[in-house]
């Protein structure tokens, strides 16, 4: 094989016209139509204090959370699903897009579709648009995250049959009933995986006088956290700093304790689901009884959450096989068949 033919086979000479982005509170996921997910990195930036010079982005920066010296600050520029720090978000998105586009020899400014919370304000919308444009986008379109997630899991969003999606991200939970390419009923709350982590941090501080960081809280949530008991309890060794003595220590934490401490945000999610169902038209409600609800987003991985919502609503709950990539897979489908899905977009 000649060097030129190998270049063509590697797609390095094919211009990248379209990019889909799930700009999430916890992770930023980027896809390219025909290639699938090409980047999945934590939404974290490490900068030098004062100069704001970037010291690390993504996974490299996340490893610095809670470990940085005084001269370096690890920042999560997105909070509650929206941009909290425009400048840092711009630097982060620019870095991620540069990583994706640097693999190509032929480069043009791409058309970008970004998944955003359905309850986003106009000010937050402008922040997303300006960040994407500054990062190198030519055209920027936005799609509500539950709509993108529904398209990503191949629900018939353009049909008159009602489909319901619960997308639980790091900062927000988005619930939507979709029919005829529109959101008929929805509920959006600023509660997600991050709030569960904060509950765990507060619980260990109050009950064990143990101070832990966000990465440790997230590990506890994923390893022994659950929404409902399944008869199999377990324990986990947790290390942190003793608030009384100031020295490091280890405690043994029980799964039942973690389950109880995260009940408040989980109940808020259940109430948001009930709220969306309460305003769903009767004809679409009957479709949901037949078809059930699809759960997407990283929060869908919390053990037993699907069973809790099913018990509270008496509806079938299905968790997607790859819940963390549903939104970005939806943006890829939109870009692949832009004529069909352009009605779900806003600029």
Image: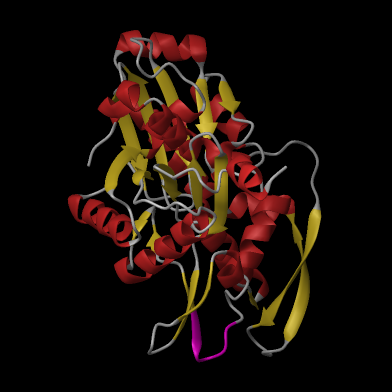
Which quadrant holds residue 181?
top left
Asked if one can make out residue 227 in the rendered structure from this viewpoint, the answer is no
**Coordinates of residue 276 in the picture (x, y in percent):** 35, 29
Q: Give the left or right position of residue 155, taking residue 304 as reference.
A: left
Along the viewing direction, whichever of 204 and 128 lies nearer the viewer: 128
Occupied quadrant, residue 8: top right
Residue 56 in sight here: yes
Position of residue 112 in the picture relative to residue 192 (left or right): left
Whether 71 is among the magenta residues is yes
Q: Residue at x 50, y 43 (%)?
A: 31
Q: Is residue 289 above or below residue 20?
A: above
Colour option used: secondary structure
Query: At which x and y percent is residue 118?
Result: 31, 40
Report the front residue among 298 and 341: 341
**Quarter of the image containing the C terminus?**
top left
The reply to whether the magenta stretch includes residue 102 is: no
Question: Which of the pair 58/203 is nearer the observer?
Answer: 58
| Residue segment shown in magenta | 68-73
Q: Position of residue 27 (x, y in %)?
A: 52, 54
Query: Which secondary structure dominates the residues rendered in magenta?
Result: loop
Residue drawn 65% across the image and 87% down it: 244
Number of numbered callouts drawn: 0
Residue 179, given in percent of the width and then of the height, sits at 33, 17
Looking at the image, is 169 positioned above or below residue 253?
above
Q: Is residue 236 above or below residue 182?
A: below
- Furthest residue toward front: 2
Q: Quadrant of the image for the N terminus?
A: top right
Residue drawn at x 68%, y 58% as measured from the top left: 220
């Amino acid at each position: 094989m000649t060097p030129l033919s190998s270049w063509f086979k590697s797609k390095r000479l094919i211009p990248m016209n379209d990019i889909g982005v799930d700009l999430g509170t916890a992770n930023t996921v980027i896809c390219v139509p025909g290639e699938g997910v090409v980047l999945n990195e934590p939404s974290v930036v490490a900068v030098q204090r004062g100069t704001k010079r970037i010291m690390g982005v993504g996974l490299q920066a996340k490893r610095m959370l809670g470990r940085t010296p005084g001269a370096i600050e690890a920042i999560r520029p997105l909070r509650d699903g929206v941009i909290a720090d425009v400048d840092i978000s711009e630097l982060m998105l620019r870095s991620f897009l540069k990583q994706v586009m640097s693999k190509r020899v032929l480069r043009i400014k791409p058309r970008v579709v970004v998944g955003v919370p359905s309850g986003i304000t106009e000010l937050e919308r402008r922040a997303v648009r300006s960040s994407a444009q500054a990062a190198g986008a030519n055209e920027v379109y936005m799609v509500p995250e539950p709509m993108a997630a529904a398209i990503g899991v191949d629900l018939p969003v353009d049909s008159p049959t009602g489909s319901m999606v619960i997308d639980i991200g790091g900062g927000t939970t988005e619930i939507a009933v979709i029919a005829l390419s529109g959101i008929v009923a929805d509920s959006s709350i600023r509660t997600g995986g991050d709030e569960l982590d904060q509950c765990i941090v507060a619980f260990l501080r109050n009950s064990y006088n143990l101070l832990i960081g966000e990465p440790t809280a997230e590990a506890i949530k994923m390893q022994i956290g659950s929404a409902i008991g399944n008869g199999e309890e377990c324990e986990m060794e947790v290390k942190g700093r003793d608030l009384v003595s100031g020295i490091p220590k280890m405690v043994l934490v029980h799964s039942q304790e973690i389950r109880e401490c995260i009940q408040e945000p989980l109940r808020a999610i259940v109430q948001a689901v009930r709220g969306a169902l309460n305003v769903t038209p009767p004809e679409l409600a009957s479709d949901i009884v037949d078809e059930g609800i699809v759960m997407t987003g990283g929060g869908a991985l919390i053990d037993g959450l699907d069973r809790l919502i099913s018990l509270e609503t008496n509806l079938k709950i299905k968790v997607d096989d790859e819940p963390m990539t549903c939104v970005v897979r939806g943006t890829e489908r939109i870009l692949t068949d832009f004529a069909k899905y352009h009605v779900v977009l806003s600029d």
